[in-house]
Amino acid sequence: MAGDRKVLVVGAGLAGLAAAYTLSRDGFEVQVLEATPRLGGRVVQQARDGFRIDLGANLFLETYATTRRLAQQLGIPLRRTPVPIHSGIYRQGRLHGLYGGNDLASLRKTARTMLSLQLLSSRGLWQVFKFARLLHAQQDHLSFDDPAQLLKLDTDESAAELFATKIGAEALDWLFGPGLSGYTFADPQQIGAAYAMATLWHNGLNGVAWPCLPNGGAGAFVEALARACGADLRLSTPVRRIVLEHGVAQGVITDAGLVKADAVICATTASVALSITPDLPPAVRDTLRRVTYSKCCRVFFAVNSSPLPRDWYAVGFPQQTGTFLTGLSNPSLLAPETAPEGKTLIDALVIGAPAQQLFALKDEQVRAQALAEVIRYLPDMSRTPLFSCVQRWPEAMCLLPGGTMTALQRLRQDGYGGVKRLCLAGDYMAVPSVNGALRSGLDAAAETAAQF
């Protein structure tokens, strides 16, 4: 009987909470152990002076079917943002607008940008057409809810290699690359081609790209999921080791000693899973080592008005621009409750090696450098923000290098090298996103329940 079985969930991010919610609802005794003093994993909110700052994951899309179903079960309505994602690319000293949604006015504005030949040459426009046609032909496989569909496109190629061999570099360098980096916090060379195609499709090329959010943002979703999961949630309880004996998970070791269980779900990043489960079979460990993560530094500025054009959510900076900024966004445009009336929040994103350099600096130095760079490209930016804050993410998003998704799926099908009563969850076990993290937790719960 399920009620006689105890399952430990390691990690209280979206994947862990989704797993705990499902298992508790099915009658299992569930205990969630979280190393930090808060829930949510990479969903982090900070309140200050009337601002609600999402320091981590903050974007839900209408195409996230798993998220929408779970939100409905939790009684959390997801509402469309006031505007779709209107954005721009900086090139040749000016901004070039790209407009989301599928209304005629937005389509005309985007067409005007593309046909002006100031953002892309005629060759680049042809490359855009080729790539859009490729994604349209593969749209049935570009699922954020069914990783098995995306496996059909999972080659060893990176996004950069895909464009170099099949599309052309100009479209990537000046159009798709900045957007891809803004959504994954990584350079195209680091991202698997299949994951890149799904990301670009759902964030614009499907013709929708309309975000939806719960009232209170991603943090409110986490709180509702935690309330509904019915599990024993224990914060500030780091797991030092998952105990495997004779190929069967027996429980975990915490600072208080052994916690026994009938099954364990490890809902952490792949790197943490490797660290706390040293007894995994070599083939399993080798597969987990293939998983890589982006790194980013985000600097948030509270200001009286946005330096971005009216109704623009974001601006991307191609690598060739020469700035260390990857992009700027205005989260208060999509979620007005993020900022008090008449105020705005600007999110300056830095990724990769420049982010690593900022990690070593004091917050005051990071703020000063980021503000000076924003003003350099957007002179209307306030020289004296109301306040600012810095968030460092050494492991921001899973990147699924080419072939990694297939290797992870094979790992699951093989039963994690014969290890029983242990399942892995996290965005790396699905298609990385809020939706993928939730999907992985639900899948891990189902796999765990099936073992009894």
Image (spheres, rainbow, N blue to C red):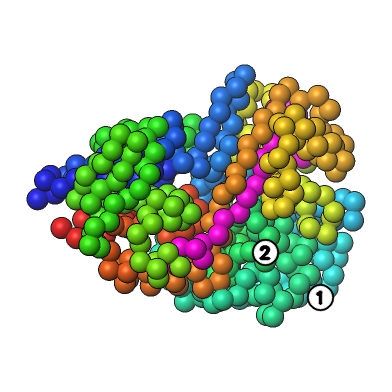
Secondary structure category for the residue under label 1: helix
Q: Which residue is mark 1?
A: 123
Amino acid type at circle 1 is Arg
Q: Is residue 11 left or right of residue 381?
A: left
Tell me where residue 20 appears, x and y as whole percent. 29, 44
Residue 374, by quadrant, is top right
Q: Give the mark nearer the N terminus: 1 vs 2.
A: 1
Mark 2 = which residue? 188
Decide: is 49 above or below 321.
Answer: above
- Kind of residue sitting beneath label 2: Pro
**Quick check: can you spot residue 23?**
no
* Picture coordinates of residue 314, whole percent (x, y): 70, 46
Bin the neighbour count of mark 2 within 10 Å (Cα to Cα): few under 14, some 14-19, many 20 and up. many
Residue with the most extreme top position: 49
Q: Residues within 10 Å of mark 1 (few under 14, many from 20)?
A: few
Q: Residue at x 78, y 41 (%)?
A: 309
From which residue to which does the magenta span run?
287-308
> Looking at the image, how many numbered discs can be counted on the residues?
2
Residue drawn 44% across the image and 52% down it: 275
Please, is residue 394 above or below residue 205 in the view?
above
Residue 305: in magenta span: yes
Q: Residue furthest bottom?
A: 165
Q: CA distance from mark 1 to mark 2?
A: 20 Å
| Residue 232 is at least partly visible in this image | yes
- The residue closer to the viewer here, 73 or 164, is 164
Residue located 52% across and 36% down the image: 44
